[in-house]
Amino acid sequence: MTSKEMCLLLGATGVGKTLLLKRLQKFIVHGLDELGTPPSTLPTVGTNLTDLTVKKKKVTVRELGGCMGPIWPSYFKDCSSVIFMVDSANIAQISSSCIQLLSVLSAEPLSKASVLILFNKRDMPCTMSLIEIKSLFRMDDIVASATQPITTLEVSARSGEGLKEVMSWLESVTVK
């Protein structure tokens, strides 16, 4: 990451961005065993800035509300990594999420940014399998044609599944 240590957290409305940030904050302080009950959240209107300490370095995560999609590009120039969240239990939202992701990946200011794509809500009974969702997104083609290094993970912000892996990714792009 650059000296600013700015990471964008993007995704459609309701995919779990705010809950992910709250859970990561608690995970950093208490670890996975003491996450407790998921906190309640409201849809983000505007932007939230959250500071996370990763290997003694401060990383500011800027969460942009899903409804702000049209103005996301105005925030691209100040970041060096992107976390893009997808609701893997909402099949109706998949195509629009894919279009948003392609728009993010094709943005010139993000051409060198490290990208983490999170398929959230793995704990839901109606979620698609990773194979299904990667097929719908054509992830192999996206990864092959992107200029950025891309990592994909399955997570459940609600249960905490995958939080350790998200922190490992943040460490890998922060501590350089």
Image (cartoon, grey):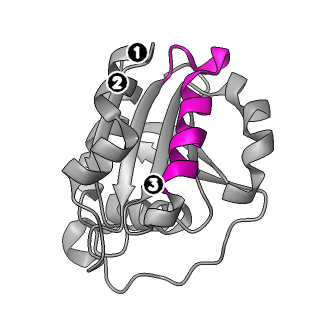
In the rendered image, the vertical position of residue 7 relative to residue 94, given as above or below? above
What crowding class fits label 3: few (fewer than 14 Cα within 10 Å), some (14-19), or many (20 or more)? many
Which residue occupies 56% across, 46% down? 9
What crowding class fits label 2: few (fewer than 14 Cα within 10 Å), some (14-19), or many (20 or more)? few
* Helix, strand or loop under label 3: strand
Q: CA distance from mark 2 to mark 1?
A: 6 Å
Q: CA distance from mark 1 to mark 3?
A: 20 Å
In the rendered image, the vertical position of residue 113 relative to residue 101, given as above or below? above
Which residue occupies 51% across, 65% down? 92
Q: Amino acid at mark 3?
A: Val
* Helix, strand or loop under label 1: helix
Q: CA distance from mark 2 to mark 3?
A: 17 Å
52 or 13, which lies in front?
Answer: 13
Q: Which residue is mark 2?
A: 141
Residue bounds of the magenta highlight? 94-113
Q: Is residue 36 left or right of residue 8?
A: left
Q: Amino acid at mark 2?
A: Asp
* Helix, strand or loop under label 2: helix
Q: Which residue is mark 1?
A: 145
Residue 38 percent across, percent down from the top left: 40, 81
150 or 61, which lies in front?
Answer: 150
